[in-house]
């Protein structure tokens, strides 16, 4: 059985999705040419496949149990405001004409989030709001949109007032959808945490894992223009313990009696 791979997490536009697919194809040619690039419909099931050669996940699912099935391969460094090395943060955005100038001012407002298993759109957002919540509530209502791009559209279209957006996604959105992002403005940011890691099944050998890391580094140097379009500057090789800070943000929100975004 051939191995499978996919890098869909930052395919914010069709051009970006094609760029990530091309980068992945170059990596696979160097490591396992027979591996199949797929388009997963159920990411949680895909990440747990024993034949997974390379994928990208969010740090929150990783600490919530995915770490039992996968190994960390690398964490990208992105050239985007809000990134520092392998760490990133979320940008808290509202409409350009909205009256909010800080997260504290958003009490009673309508919040949008991409998914409850997202670190950038939910966990970090909840952690930022937690100190201001009263009796487990802060917002007037919440809306699950399914994606960061969906949250941006919800805020811009006045279906929500505020959202926390992965700063890498926001940088890509500014490039790809300037008319959308021009209708929004930032009013804050979340605590920084390790970025979205590249992962492989625990069944992947140490030799293959090392080959994947070498191939990732090589693809940046042989295609510098593509790396620039993907805002890729390099990679770090973090330990599982580095991602404990994401669990810590969840725990701090729960201690503040703010277990869910509300």
Image: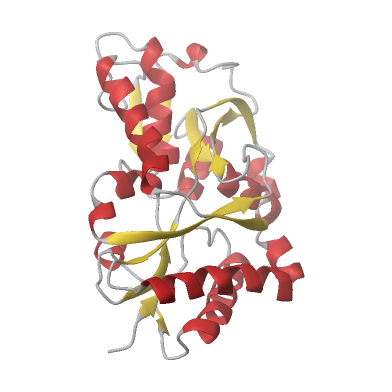
Front-most of 10 and 79? 79
Query: Image height check: is 101 above or below 69?
Result: above
243 or 116: nearer the eye? 243
Q: Is residue 250 above or below residue 11?
A: above
Query: Which quadrant does the N terminus fall into?
Result: bottom left
Residue at 62 percent across and 37 percent down: it is 82
**Is residue 113 visible to the viewer in this orientation of the structure?**
no
Q: Residue furthest top?
A: 134
Q: Residue at x 42, y 32 (%)?
A: 124
Q: Position of residue 153 (x, y in %)?
A: 52, 44
Q: Which residue is painted at 25% across and 70% down in the image? A: 49
Q: Position of residue 213 (x, y in %)?
A: 52, 68
Residue pictured at 61% horizontal, 71% vertical: 19
Residue 139 as seen in the image, left or right of residue 163: left
- Image quadrant in which the C terminus is located: top left
List x then y, in percent, for residue 106: 47, 16
Residue 97, how many percent across, how many down?
Answer: 64, 24
- State whether residue 88 appears in this view: yes
Above or below residue 34? Residue 205 is: above
Position of residue 34 in the picture relative to residue 166 (left or right): left
Is 219 in front, or is 237? 237
């Amino acid at each position: 059985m051939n191995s499978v791979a996919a890098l869909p997490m930052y395919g914010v536009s069709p051009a970006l999705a094609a760029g990530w697919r091309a980068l992945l194809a170059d990596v696979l040619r160097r490591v396992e040419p027979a591996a199949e690039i797929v388009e997963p419909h159920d990411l949680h099931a895909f990440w747990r496949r024993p034949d997974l050669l390379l994928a990208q996940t969010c740090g929150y699912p990783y600490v919530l149990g995915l770490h039992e099935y996968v190994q960390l391969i690398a964490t990208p460094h992105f050239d985007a405001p809000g990134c520092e090395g392998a760490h990133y943060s979320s940008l808290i955005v509202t409409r350009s004409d909205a009256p909010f100038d800080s997260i504290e001012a958003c009490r009673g407002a309508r919040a949008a989030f991409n998914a409850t298993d997202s670190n950038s759109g939910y966990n970090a957002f909840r952690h930022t709001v937690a100190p201001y919540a009263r009796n487990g509530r802060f917002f007037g209502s919440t809306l699950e949109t399914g994606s960061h791009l969906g949250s941006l559209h919800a805020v811009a279209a006045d279906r929500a007032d505020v959202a926390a957006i992965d700063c890498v996604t926001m940088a890509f959105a500014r490039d790809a959808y300037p008319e959308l992002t021009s209708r929004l403005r930032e009013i804050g940011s979340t605590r920084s945490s390790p970025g979205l890691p590249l992962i492989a099944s625990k069944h992947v050998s140490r030799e293959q894992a090392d080959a994947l890391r070498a191939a990732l580094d090589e693809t940046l140097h042989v295609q510098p223009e593509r790396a620039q379009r993907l805002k890729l500057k390099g990679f770090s090789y973090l330990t599982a313990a580095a991602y404990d800070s994401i669990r810590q943000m969840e725990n701090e929100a729960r201690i503040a009696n703010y277990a869910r975004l509300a």
